Image (cartoon, rainbow, N blue to C red):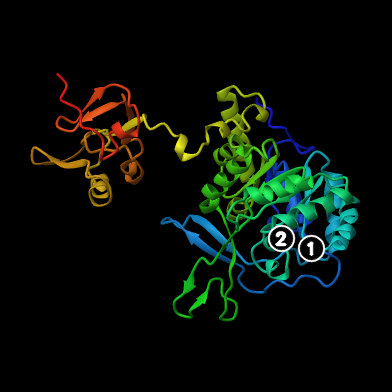
Amino acid sequence: MADLTTHFAGIKSPNPFWLASAPPTDKAYNVERALKAGWGGVVWKTLGEEGPPVVNVNGPRYGAIWGADRRLLGLNNIELITDRALQQNLREIKEIKMKWPDRAVVVSIMVPCEEESWKAILPLVEETGADGIELNFGCPHGMSERGMGSAVGQVPEYVEMVVRWCKQYTRMPVITKLTPNITDVRKPARAAKAGGTDAVSLINTINSITAVNLDTFSPEPSIDGKGTHGGYCGPAVKPIALSMVSEIARDPETYGLPISGIGGISTWRDAAEFMALGSGTVQVCTAAMTYGFKIVEEMITGLSNWMDEKGYASVDEFVGRAVRNVTDWQYLNLNYVTKARIDQDLCIKCGRCHIACEDTSHQAITKDKDGKRHFEVMDDECVGCNLCVNVCPVDDCITMVEVAPGLVDQRTGQVVPGEYANWTTHPNNPMAKVAEPAE
């Protein structure tokens, strides 16, 4: 079987699946259950400085977005960092690490953006025997209003400054958790690297309001008639997370910086996609909160089977392999041409492809043949956009096939063989030269 062991920024774990810093990692009881289920590591829920404890709301803490089948697509979370005493957390972290020495135990930290605050808490965490720390520069709600979380993560100079303090005052590996609530995620990543960070993790939650109650006119979740913005997570944020991970992985200034991928990971396939884009480990939260800790069993089995099928002996053999295929739009091959094809044996005659193409695309799908309901693609009108593939309710009923590059004779609808010299002769260009009919 494939070896799932990971070595991430000097931290070893038996598999790349870590629980993210969140409610599931708030206490030893939860973490113990998670590690028994098979998780390779945990990032302990964010600790704050000693003093009066953080006070969380005693009402609803989550808003939600569901799919048509009520499958949970996204959560809006207004919970703050841990509201348990610092010393209690530290004792439990130490106990867990002593009991589970083979698992990664990373501690998330968020304290005021002052050197003395970081200098004070770092040795306390180090004494627990934890494998590393994660600097929480991502939370967009509650703590950000207090000058922490994303309020720091959105200012690259602050990111670099705090990372430097941490590297100065601890021997533990430092993972910098980045906020997605920023125009260009590469800038704080570059700042973290300049400060000496050992790795970055991303994405943290996205600032959001998921719904408004139209009876009370209060955002959800509602606390005594009022609501607030929170952090959005779950499957819905995965595309955003993949893009941001790829930007850091392919940026020349952060190339080679270890990445722990976070954002909507629910299956082994999700995890493999993050890893292919450069993530050495992946962190999971919403899926565990939805389905329980044992989902990791399926993730481990699925990833292992896929690696065996592909011939990968270790995770290092495929981590980052997709990065070289992420490019800017201007470098895409405009000579590559595809057309849609409808499998008439699989077609259920629902007409969704025709409606989508007719109303919103390129009017390239006919709906009748010999007086009967029949859907077929007209190559001379099809631009290969694949909208029809995405709206079709039947798997593999509509597929995209590559056709030879050449000029399209708009009178016959046939592709005339020959390479395109440039965009001016590309059939997708409405101003392209019309070829003479083939003899």
Residue extending farthest top: 439
Disc 1 vs disc 2: Cβ atoms closer than 8 Å?
yes
Which residue in the rendered view is the most extreme toward the left?
371
Q: Amino acid at mark 2?
A: Val
Residue 157 % position (x, y): 73, 56
Viewer-nearest residue: 68 or 239: 239
Label placed on residue 12: none
Please report the residue visible at 58 percent of the width from the left and 39 percent of the height from the top: 268
Cα separation, mark 1 vs mark 2, equals: 8 Å
SS of the residue at dot 2? helix
Type of residue at label 1?
Cys
| For residue 409, side relative to residue 274 (left or right) | left
Q: x, y percentage for residue 203?
A: 62, 51
Label 2 packing within 10 angstroms: few (<14), some (14-19), many (20+): many
Above or below, comparing residue 32 to residue 10 in the picture: below
- At a point 85% along the width and 60% down the height, the residue shown is 115
Q: Is residue 266 visible?
A: no
Q: Where is mark 2, residue-wise?
A: 152
Q: Is residue 111 left or right of residue 20?
A: right
The answer to which of 354 and 186 lies nearer the viewer is: 186
Q: Quadrant of the N terminus?
A: top right
Helix, strand or loop at mark 1: loop
| Image mark for residue 113 | 1
Label whose residue precedes the other's in the sequence (1 or 2): 1
Determine if residue 77 is in view: yes
Q: Is residue 333 left or right of residue 247?
A: left
User: In the rendered picture of this protein, how many numbered marks are placed on residues?
Assistant: 2
Compared with residue 56, is residue 255 higher up or lower down, i.e. above or below? above
- Residue 327 vertical position relative to residue 165 in the rendered view, above or below: above
Up/down of 35 relative to 379, above or below? below
